[in-house]
Amino acid sequence: MPQLEGDKDRRITIGELSRRSGVAASALHFYERNGLIDSERTDGNQRRYRRDALRRVAFIRVSQRVGIPLKDIRSALDSLPDGRTPTKKDWARLSQRWRDELDARIRQLEHLRGDLDGCIGCGCLSLTSCGLQNPGDVLGLEGSGPIRWTGSPAAE
């Protein structure tokens, strides 16, 4: 459909933004409360979004899908001049920065998976040798006996 003159300035409703982005209205409200997207209010107090909110929502969803925390997504969006919509060049810059963080998380998860495999083998979650419960037996430095309290206040 050809774009009409002035169409780029047309505002869309939350229902239209939800339908076109595939994101629930409640999630859009959440994004707005957290400063990820903006709306204007009509005289009847209804939200209206600029059409470029569609691209911002897509940016948020893709970033979330690869595991980027919302605070980092907001920081990335805040770094754009005049709050504009991310471009392909912006995505390349931001994704390169996030790539290092993702690689570090992947290494950490692979290490955790290895520890979990060993833990399943012992079956006891040994406090002296369990790499998950007590890495390097650091609790042994605290002395013998129970170190971690896992009960409820009523159990005292």
Image (cartoon, grey):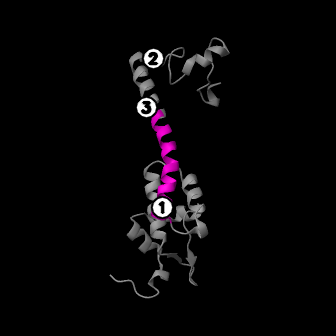
Give the residues in magenta: 86-107
Tag 1 or tag 2, which sits nearer the N-term?
Answer: 1
Viewer-nearest of discs 3 and 2: 3
Residue extending farthest to the top is 144
Are the residues flagged by discs 2 and 1 in contact, CB closer than 8 Å?
no
Give the structural element (helix, strand or loop) at label 1.
Answer: helix
Q: Main secondary structure of the magenta part?
A: helix
83 vs 96, nearest the viewer: 96
Whether residue 26 is visible here, answered yes or no, is: no
Amino acid at circle 1: Lys
Q: Position of residue 22 (x, y in %)?
A: 38, 64
Q: Quadrant of residue 118?
A: top left
Q: Residue at x 44, y 71 (%)?
A: 17
Amino acid at circle 2: Cys
Disc 3 and disc 2: Cα gap in Å? Answer: 22 Å
- Which image quarter is the N terminus in? bottom left
Disc 1 and disc 3: Cα gap in Å? Answer: 31 Å
Tag 3 or tag 1, which sits nearer the N-term?
Answer: 1
Viewer-nearest of discs 2 and 1: 1
Side of 23 where 49 appears, left or right: right
Give the structural element (helix, strand or loop) at label 2.
Answer: loop
Q: Residue at x 53, y 23 (%)?
A: 133
Residue extending farthest to the bottom is 5
Are the residues flagged by discs 1 and 3 in contact, CB closer than 8 Å?
no
Viewer-nearest of discs 1 and 3: 1
On residue 20, the disc is none
Q: Residue at x 45, y 17 (%)?
A: 124
Q: Dot 1 corresponds to which residue?
A: 89
On residue 110, the disc is 3
Q: Residues within 10 Å of mark 1 (few under 14, many from 20)?
A: few
On residue 124, the disc is 2
